[in-house]
Image (cartoon, helix red, strand yellow):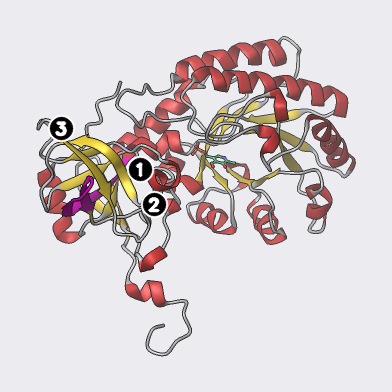
Amino acid sequence: MNPKTPPFDAAKIREISKEFPTPFYLYDEQAIRKTAQDFSAAFDWAPAGFRNHYAVKACPNPRILKILAEEGMGTDCSSMAELILSEAVGITGDKAFLTANNTPLSEYQKAKELGAIINLDDITHIPFLEQIGLPSTLSFRFNPGPLKGGNDLIGKPEEAKYGLTPDQMVEAYKLAKSKGVKKFGIHTMVASNELNPDYFVETADLLLRLLADVSEKAGVTIDFVNFGGGIGIPYRPEDDAVDLQRVSEGIKKRYTEYIVNAALKPPKLLFECGRAITGPHGYLVTEAVHEKHIYKDYVGVNACMADLMRPGLYGAYHHATVLGKENVAPTETYDVVGSLCENNDKFAIDRKLPPIDQGDIVVFHDAGAHGRAMGFNYNGKLRPAELLMKADGSVELIRRAETLKDYFSTLSYPGLA
Ligand SMILES: Cc1ncc(COP(=O)(O)O)c(C=O)c1O
């Protein structure tokens, strides 16, 4: 259970919105820092060290990345833009990862320039990367296929486009070694938004056993093991957060069994979680503009699916709080909708809420990861600003809202560009 209490009230939002009109994203810096610290502390037993490489795609704002860098995190990048963001905040060298797929040479080139660790998605990417010279360190992404079921959100590994098969893993390390690569890592990611702690322990079990196997068969030493992202967050009030202590203890047991007891060199432990770090600490703040009563009761807010796509895309639940009405009985059943000409544009369907009036502030929780980042411009919608709320309650604009000028800026048409 989690109470879903936002760290601000209606008066605070009204004050903020005088300077920065709704809708906007608001991130809670203090809570992000605390979560980052707790995450690292949970794995402080790892003998060769631990680091979470924050998945930049979850919240690609350099101010957020800088905070995470200060808390000791690295980055996991999936594109040129994300590599440049990582570089901008000073996360380079082995603190940056490139875990991409179907990757163009230009992105490998940029990763090499930064000294970032390249995590290859296929064995054929070895000769591809050789065109610009192989780096001295390489990692490979493992796809366990039917050996391990993925979770609902990510689907079956054998139907996923990512990674190498077990046999290919052995061949890839042999090939890379024969071409002069000196240092190796191993990676997998088979879950997304998973709340069951045992799932991560089972994944670690599989990957650590594979590590031992490829080390022997390919005659290599693996210096780091990356368990990917995918740790879920309790979007619903009745959900429990993932028990990190349990994940950590389970992984430690396997690490001891397959690595320490087998006298293998202890690899550094890595994750590349995004959602679990910033997800619960970002809010999409909107205002109710319309209500409509036809076959169902609707409340229209001044944001839409272009600002937060998850509910429309996969029916994801985002808890809604009507500020100032936290203690009013949820006597109404609303669809809370945006303004896109797209019937999926619903933040909530048949949601029990207190009566909502025009001008009420409606806040959607858990929007701090894969929220604004997944936004788009369909229907000519302009994406909202991002604000950072500091420990003292002050607010910093960390990305302004888009303007019509931004929207038209790529056109070649007189009077618009
Ligand atoms: C390769 C990779 N790593 C890490 C992540 C981060 O996942 P999450 O934010 O759910 O932890 C993703 C998400 O799509 C991913 O594709």
Q: Which residue is mark 1?
A: 367
Q: Nearer the viewer, residue 363 or 18?
A: 363
Q: Which residue is mark 3?
A: 330
Res. 10 image quadrant: top left
Q: Nearer the viewer's eye, disc 2 or disc 3?
A: 3
Please give the range of residues in magenta: 282-300
Where residue 164 sits: x, y (%)? 75, 37
Q: Nearer the viewer, residue 263 or 192?
A: 192
As measured in the structure, the alpha-carbon distance from the residue carrying label 2 to the one carrying label 1 is 8 Å
- Magenta span has 284? yes
| Residue lying furthest right | 178
Residue at image location 15% in from the left, 32% down from the top: 330
Say which element carries label 2: helix
Determine whether label 2 and label 1 are within 8 Å by CB: yes
- Magenta span has 361? no
> Reading the chain from its start, which is encountered first: label 1 or label 3?
3
Q: Is residue 267 above or below residue 312?
A: above
Q: Nearer the viewer, residue 328 or 189?
A: 328
Residue at image location 57% in from the left, 36% down from the top: 154
Query: Does any atom of ligand 1 lie closer than 8 Å to the CB of label 3?
Result: no
Q: Residues within 10 Å of mark 1 (few under 14, many from 20)?
A: many
Tell me which image quadrant ligand 1 sits in: top right
Where residue 337 sits: x, y (%)? 28, 50
Res. 204 image quadrant: top right
> Reading the chain from its start, which is encountered first: label 2 or label 3?
3
Left or right side of 278 for 161: right
What's under tag 2, amino acid-wise?
Arg
Q: Which residue is mark 2?
A: 372
